[in-house]
Image (spheres, rainbow, N blue to C red):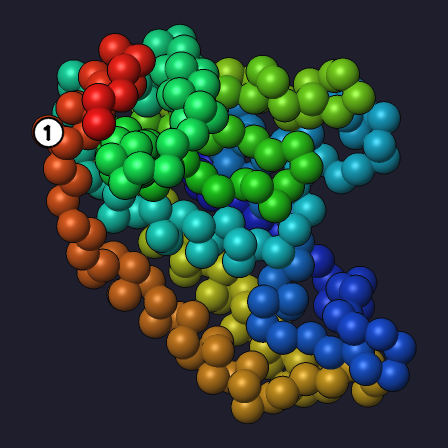
Amino acid sequence: MPALFQFTLTPLELIQPWGEPGEYCLHWFGLTDGQYWMEVGANKLFEYSENARGLLGISRYCDYHVVRLYEDVLEMVPHVLEPVPSSLVKYLSGDMGRAWDEKASSWYSEGCERDRFWAIADDASAWIGSRTLDTGYLSPSTKIRMWSDQSLVHVEWDNTEKLIQGSPAWSASRGIFCLSRAKFLAEVLSFHTRLMKKMSERVEKVLAGALPPEVQVDFSGLQREQSERFRSIETALKELVVPTNWQSVTEAIHEIERNTFDV
């Protein structure tokens, strides 16, 4: 089975440096420029549809800094591995999850300045947000959620409304892919190991003078960040999240379902 998280790095000589002529620079983040995608069974997430690629002349996969996906995945891990009660899965997944998103969004848009409104909104939505991959930096974005029950991690996507000039933006429209909790954690560790190995090699090349002389690089800062990034997995996997108050979540959802607001 292919790795869940896939990426390629842009060759050093093709990376566009940051800044204006005479002030070009690159940092560790910028050096992760590349493409990335996720292998979910027969589908690939972050893969543009053939039609979208033909319309815009874009690359096959998401063309961005690979570390952005890496950071967002690490931030999600503690939440993904906190099992969602079976009674609440329907608000997160499938057709009912989609209907719930629409109902909750409509309720939120009514607005209210009272503290109780915001408490309900936060209880009803924060647990979903922490299990939704942040792709707002893409246009259009892609809707991907990752969550678990007691035995499996579910990777679920719904891109049916993500369009480019009226056509589907992404090759994977809607679906779900499951893997064991242990396998998901192993995939996160594999992503970390592969990215850090590639970036270690890249940093060594930069230190040896692989970039044009007009591109400014803080060599000591680059080495320091490589070391910090290498250790970041330890922090992420040991990160303790406050256990979700599922009773408060349930009560907030029921409040919105009743479409009432008692002050």
List x then y, in percent, for residue 240: 18, 56
Residue 195 lies left or right of residue 243; in this view the side is: right
List x then y, in percent, for residue 142: 56, 31
Classed neighbour count for the residue bearing mark 1: other residues with Cα under 10 Å, few (<14), some (14–19), many (≥20): few
Which residue shows up at 16% across the image and 40% down it?
Answer: 244
Image quarter (top left, top right, bottom left or bottom right) of the N terminus: top left
Instruction: Answer with the quarter of the image where residue 18 lies.
Output: bottom right
Q: Secondary structure at mark 1?
A: helix
List x then y, in percent, for residue 241: 20, 52
Q: Name the amino acid, label 1.
A: Gln
Image quarter (top left, top right, bottom left or bottom right) of the C terminus: top left
Task: Name the foreground residue: 77 vs 119.
Answer: 119
User: Does 52 appear above or below 183?
Assistant: above
Do we see residue 187 in this rendering?
A: yes
Task: Name the foreground residue: 217 vs 91.
Answer: 91
Do we see residue 101 in this rendering?
A: no
Which residue shows up at 41% across the image and 11% down it?
Answer: 99
Residue 32 lies left or right of residue 235; in this view the side is: right
Instruction: Answer with the quarter of the image where residue 71 lies.
Output: bottom left
Which residue, given by chain and number where applicable, does mark 1 sit on?
247
Which residue shows up at 48% across the image and 76% down it?
Answer: 226
Instruction: Answer with the quarter of the image where residue 33 lies.
Output: bottom right
Which residue shows up at 79% across the image and 29% down it?
Answer: 53
Residue 241 lies left or right of residue 169; in this view the side is: left
User: Does 252 appear above or below 61?
Assistant: above
List x then y, in percent, for residue 23: 81, 82
Q: Residue furthest left?
A: 247
> How many dots with numbers?
1
